[in-house]
Image: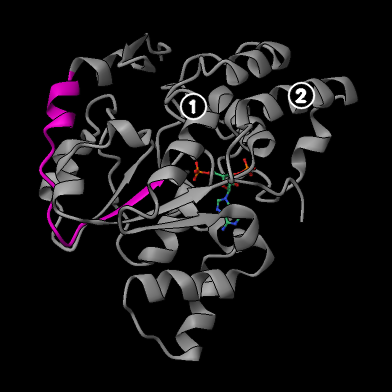
Amino acid sequence: YLRPETKEVNGIPMTKVISDIWDQIWSFQAKPDDLVIATYPKAGTTWTQEIRNITYKQHPFIEWEMPPPLKSGLDLAKEMPSPRTLKTHLPVQLLPPSFWKENCKIIYMARNAKDVLVSYYHFSRMTKTMPEPGTWEEYIESFKTGKVLWGSWYDHVKGWWDQKDQHRILYLFYEDMKEDPKREIRKILKFLEKEVTEEVLDKIVYHTSFQVMKHNPMANYTTLPSSIMDHSISPFMRKGIPGDWKNHFTVAQSEAFDKDYREKMAGSTLTFRTEI
Ligand code: A3P
């Protein structure tokens, strides 16, 4: 499979296929009862989606184009019965405006930069619809400078953070989810105005745990052809923990990363934990 060309949309690197149909994505028609799961890639999109709806498996990415015979995100979204759950990695300024107009609920899941970088690096190695990540050293630079698909992590997490109080946005953290999934799932259910018994809540916690999802073919992406995702290179459900960055960054790389991080995140009230 040929790795995709990239092409910017308003300064954000996207695949060329997505760029080419950008007008259609931008004019996407939201419905008031749509729920959006918004994330920077590798922040826990699949996990959040599993919590949202254990039984309905096709939650399309609004901006995702897959090679035929797989359907585009836009087509899947149009076919999906309401209430829909739609995923997106778009930075906040590129969310199609009808989601704001319809005042849709949005769950934003954020994860610390270093673990995202590691996860994105391995994901880019195993997913053939992503550009080649290059070497580990090269990838650190691409990530820092936002030269990866969906752009800068720093701008993404800050952009959504700055909008969260103006809209119906529940802003959550991967590290909190790991620390106490039951507590965080309760927050999600409250936000969705869903009441469940303690027994059902325990079941959701169990079925959305890393170990169970890792072995669930409906959640671990192993049903995709290996020409798209090659799990022998790196599994999609890779480690599922905060702090794996320590096994990848050298001390020097980590220090340089932190210095640059402080500059990029200066002035923001948004903080992350890099381990729990
Ligand atoms: P790792 O590569 O660090 O293991 P996304 O769904 O946004 O693409 O994110 C994928 C990342 O979330 C992967 O991280 C994956 O293992 C992790 N993940 C998926 N389900 C999880 C779960 N139930 N618990 C913890 N981590 C999970």
Secondary structure found at label 2: helix
Check the image and name the residue furthest to the front. 267
Q: Classify mark 1: residues with Cα within 10 Å, few (<14), some (14-19) or many (20+).
A: many
Magenta stretch holds residue 23: yes
* Model colouring: one colour
Magenta stretch holds residue 145: no
Measured from the top left, where is residue 24 in percent x and y? Answer: 12, 27
The amino acid on which the numbered mark 1 sits, given as a three-letter code, is Thr
Q: How many marks?
A: 2
Q: Residue beneath label 1, please?
A: 127
Instruction: Judge left or right: residue 65 versus residue 257.
Output: left
Measured from the top left, where is residue 111 in percent x and y? Answer: 59, 45
Measured from the top left, where is residue 137 in percent x and y? Answer: 73, 13
Residue at 48% over, 51% down: 109
Instruction: Judge left or right: residue 103 versus residue 37.
Output: left
Q: Quadrant of the N terminus?
A: top left
Q: Which residues are magenta?
A: 21-38
> Is ligand 1 less than 8 Å from the beta carbon at label 2?
no
Q: Residue beneath label 2, please?
A: 259
Residue at 20% over, 36% down: 96
Residue at 65% over, 70% down: 180
The amino acid on which the numbered mark 2 sits, given as a three-letter code, is Lys
Q: Earlier in the sequence, mark 1 or mark 2?
A: 1
Secondary structure found at label 1: loop
Q: Quadrant of the C terminus?
A: bottom right
**Residue 255 shows up from this direction:** yes
Measured from the top left, where is residue 90 in percent x and y? Answer: 35, 34
Give the label, 1 or 2, closer to the camera.
2
**Of 78 and 38, the residue lying toward us:** 38
**Of 84 and 222, the residue lying toward us:** 84
